[in-house]
Amino acid sequence: MEKVLHVTRSIWKWIKLKFLSFWYFITGRENPHTGVFSAEGMASKKASGTLQPQQQVVHKVIMVGTGGVGKSALTLQFMYDEFVEEYEPTKADSYRKKVVLDGEECSIDILDTAGQEDYSAIRDNYYRSGEGFICVFSILDMESFEATNEFREQILRVKNSDNSVPIVLVGNKGDMREQRVVPAELCRQRAEQWGVHYVETSAKRRENVDKVFYDLMREMKRRKGGAATTIGIDASASAGRKKRSGIKKHCTIL
Ligand SMILES: Nc1nc2c(ncn2[C@@H]2O[C@H](COP(=O)(O)OP(=O)(O)OP(=O)(O)O)[C@@H](O)[C@H]2O)c(=O)[nH]1
Ligand SMILES: [Mg+2]
């Protein structure tokens, strides 16, 4: 008898849960048991501009610059606190990390692109999806510095913008400053000309790495205002997972 009662209670509980899930789905209300919104509910919340915890803001960042300047090294330091000495040219790698930006939890998507010339034709497609760009050169390589102008022009062209795309100019390999060939003054001038921040980094020593990403995210957040990109519930769980598959003038020297 007790067994029959137990089975009946379980079936009743199951029917109740299914009914409630269906109810929350069709009304678009938050299910207090799961914290999950229906798709419709999410859309209306997004339109009203109030982001719930499950709908995190995502900042989409793209690493650009010529081959060998340290785009991957900076990305890997930011993601995993590790420095890779060996040079392995990138084709395209994407990463996602949950971060707390000025007290607010959000996510950053990083697309680490290929600097080598062979891949230049596919850059347009990548740039289209970017909201902010980290334009990297090596302070040991004048050509890589010169090339930053072309990267910026391509970004502005693809984004159909005059100069309102968030960009940070980064001079990397700061740990080898005694061998520098790009004068710091020239870097500052270029950043001033572009109206962006200039930061000198060392991916090897993890100097100013976080600053680059956080400065850019702040700028992106400021410009996005209410129209933030959001991700759904399932994507927000992928913290730290590698998914292989008018600006103030500012300068930071180490
Ligand atoms: N000393 C020093 N070496 C660095 C630094 N950053 C990167 N490197 C080295 O420079 C080489 C190239 O670095 P990558 O990060 O692979 O360069 P990349 O810009 O991603 O190159 P592509 O993927 O071809 O576009 C590697 O051997 C790194 O170890 C740095 O801050 N200091
Ligand atoms: Mg790379």
Image (tube, rainbow, N blue to C red):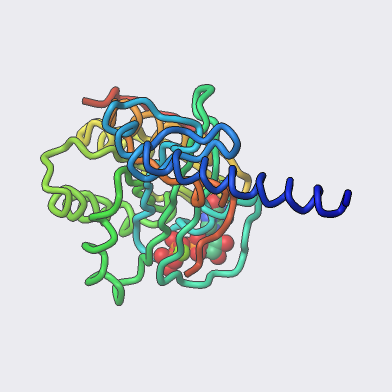
What's the residue at 34%, 55% (across, down)?
Answer: 64
What's the residue at 46%, 48% (across, down)?
Answer: 172
Q: Is residue 68 visible?
A: no
Q: Is residue 134 above or below residue 189?
A: below
- Residue occupying the far front of the picture: 1
Which of the pair 1/9 is nearer the observer?
1
Q: Is residue 163 left or right of residue 240?
A: left
Instruction: Give the quarter of the image for residue 28.
Output: top left
Where is residue 130? Give x, y as percent.
Answer: 30, 50
Which of the pair 20/51 is nearer the observer?
20
Where is residue 95? Give x, y as percent.
Answer: 49, 56
Q: Is residue 249 visible?
A: yes
What's the residue at 53%, 41% (across, down)?
Answer: 209
Number of marks in picture: 0
Q: Is residue 184 above or below residue 11?
A: above
Where is residue 190? Give x, y as percent.
Answer: 25, 38
Q: Is residue 246 above or below residue 95?
A: above
Instruction: Give the quarter of the image for residue 66.
Output: bottom left
